[in-house]
Amino acid sequence: MTENNNRAVAAAILPLVGGAGNVTSIAHCMTRLRLGLRDRTLVQDEQLKALPAVMGVVEDTTYQIVLGPGTVARVTPEFEALVEAERTEQERPATPTPLTPLTADDLAAQGAAIKAERKAKNATPIKLFLRKIANIFVPLIPALIGCGIIAGFNGLMVNLGLLPAVTPALAAIATGFMALIAVFVGLNTAKEFGGTPILGGAVAAIIVFPGVANINAFGQPLSPGQGGVLGALGAAVLAVYVEKWCRQWIPQSLDVLLTPTLTVLISGLVTVFGLMFVAGEISTAIGDFAGWLLSTGGAAAGFILGGLFLPLVMLGLHQALIPIHATLIEQQGFTVLLPILAMAGAGQVGAAAAVYLRLPRNGSIRRTIKSALPAGLLGVGEPLIYGVSLPLGRPFITACVGGAFGGGVVGLLNQLGGSVGSTAIGPSGWALFPLLDGNKGLATMIAVYAAGLIAGYVAGFLATYFFGFSKQMLTDFNADTDTPAAAPPAPDAPEKEPATL
C-alpha cells in the first residue's frame, strides 16, 4: 500500500470516529489502530466496517480498528497527522480586533489574542522541531520533580544522620529513574517523531547497558551512559527513520519480522560505534560551557539570561534549553541555569505588585492581580503575563528588567562560589526551594536563591512603578471600573414610550 493509500485510509476513518475533536488518544499494536474516544455515540460503526481496509472493530478500554500487520503501522502516523492538522485548523484564531484595554476582561482578551498569535507565528520548521524536543522531555518532568525532592530529602537525612537503615532505600528510589532516563527519552522520541516507541526505547537502552564497557569505539572503551539523553535522543530519531525506510520497502508479509529487527540492528550499531561517542563529547562540552559561563560571566551572564528568558518564551526558543537542562541534571545532578531563568517569574511578580498600586481605582485589574499573584509566587507566571503585563506592554518590559536583576544576583553569587542549581526542570518561584542543590550547604543554597528572588521582586516593582506607565496609560487604566455609569436625570414630565412594533 502506497503512502497516498495509507493517507486515504486514515482520511476515511477519521470522520467515521467523530473527527479529531472526538479522539483523545492514538496508539497501535501489531494489527489494530487503538483510539481513545470522547463520545462513543459519534462513531459510525457500520460505515467503518464497510471500508475495504478495515477488517473489523473491537471494543475494549479503547476503540480498536483492525487493519492488519504492516498496514496499521503505516496508517497510524497518517491518522495522527490528520488529527493534528484538523485540531490546528479548529484552533486557528480569528484576526483580533484592536482593543483599548480598560478592564481585566479586556486585558485577558488581548492577552489571549497575543498568545494565539504567538502560537501561530511559532509554527516555523525550527520552532516546530523545538516543540517536538520539548514534547519529549515534558512528560518526564513529574518523575524528575518527585525523584529530585526525594533526593534532597534523603541528602538532608544523611547529613543529619537520621534513619541510616532507610536512606539507602531512598537513594535507590531517587536515582533509579535517572539511571534509566535515556530509555524514557528514547520511548518519547520515537513516539514524537512518528515511530514505534518501544523500538526507540530499545535502541536508547543500549546507552545505559553495562556491557558497552567491553566495546571500543574511536580507540577507547565506551562507558555506560556515555552520551546520556542527547545520545538517546539521536539514537531514537535514527531508529524512527530506519523504521520508516523499512516499512516503505519491506513487503507487508515480512514487516512484522524484519522491520523491528533491522531497526534495532542498524540503529544500534550506529549508536554504539558513533552516536555514543559524539553525544558524549557534546554533553561534556555543554557541562563545561555552563560552568565556564557562570564562573567567568557571573553577574553579566545572569543578567542577560534572566532578562531574556521571557522573550525567548514568547518566541518559542526556550524549548531548546530543555535538553541542556536534562544533560546538566544527568551529569552533575542539577542544572545551574534554571534558578537564574526562574528569576523572570520574580520580575513578573514585582511588576504585578507595582501595577496593583499604580491603578488604585481599577478594581477589575486589581482583582485579577490578587487572584494570579499566589500562582506567580509559586512559579506559574502565565496568568500574570497574559492577563496583566503583556497586554499592558511597558510593564512586560519592566518585568523583564526585574528578571535581569534577579538573574544577575544569582550569577554573581555563583561566580563568588555559591553554585546553586535545581535537580528537576519545570518548577520555579517558591516551588523551586525543595529542589535546590549545589556545591554548598542547604542554608547557603536557599540564601542564594532567595536573594535572587528578592532582587527580582524589588527591581521588577521599582522599574514598573516608575517607568511602567505613561501619563496616557494612567489616564486610560486608572478608572473606577466597578462603578456603574450615572443614570440620566429624570425628565420634568414622563414621556410616553413609543409603541413596540
Image (tube, rainbow, N blue to C red):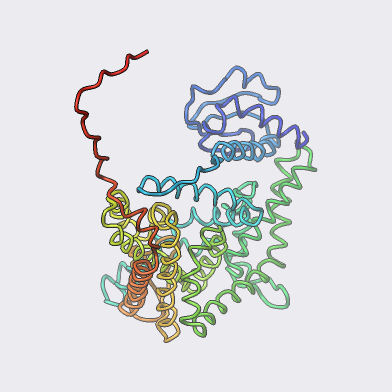
Q: Quadrant of residue 279?
A: bottom right
Q: Where is residue 460 in the image (x, y as percent from the top left)?
A: 37, 68
Which residue shows up at 35% across the image and 48% down it? 104
Q: Where is residue 267 in the image (x, y as percent from the top left)?
A: 70, 57
Q: Where is residue 251 in the image (x, y as percent from the top left)?
A: 79, 38
As drawn, 60 above or below 323? above
Quarter of the figure that contains the C terminus: top left
Quarter of the figure that contains the N terminus: top right
Which residue shows up at 26% across the image and 73% down it? 162
Q: Where is residue 40 in the image (x, y as percent from the top left)?
A: 49, 25
Q: Can residue 103 be seen in this view?
A: yes
The residue nearer to you, when weighing 405 against 242, is 405
The residue nearer to you, when weighing 89 against 17, is 89
Count every numbered label the image shows and give the total. Answer: 0
Which residue shows up at 45% across the image and 84% down it? 415
As drawn, 144 above or below 61? below
Q: Quadrant of residue 406?
A: bottom left
As drawn, 125 above or below 208? above
Image-based side of 88 in relation to 240, left or right: left
Q: Is residue 169 visible?
A: no
The residue nearer to you, when weighing 380 against 37, is 380
Farthest residue in the front direction? 492
The residue nearer to you, when weighing 249 against 92, is 92
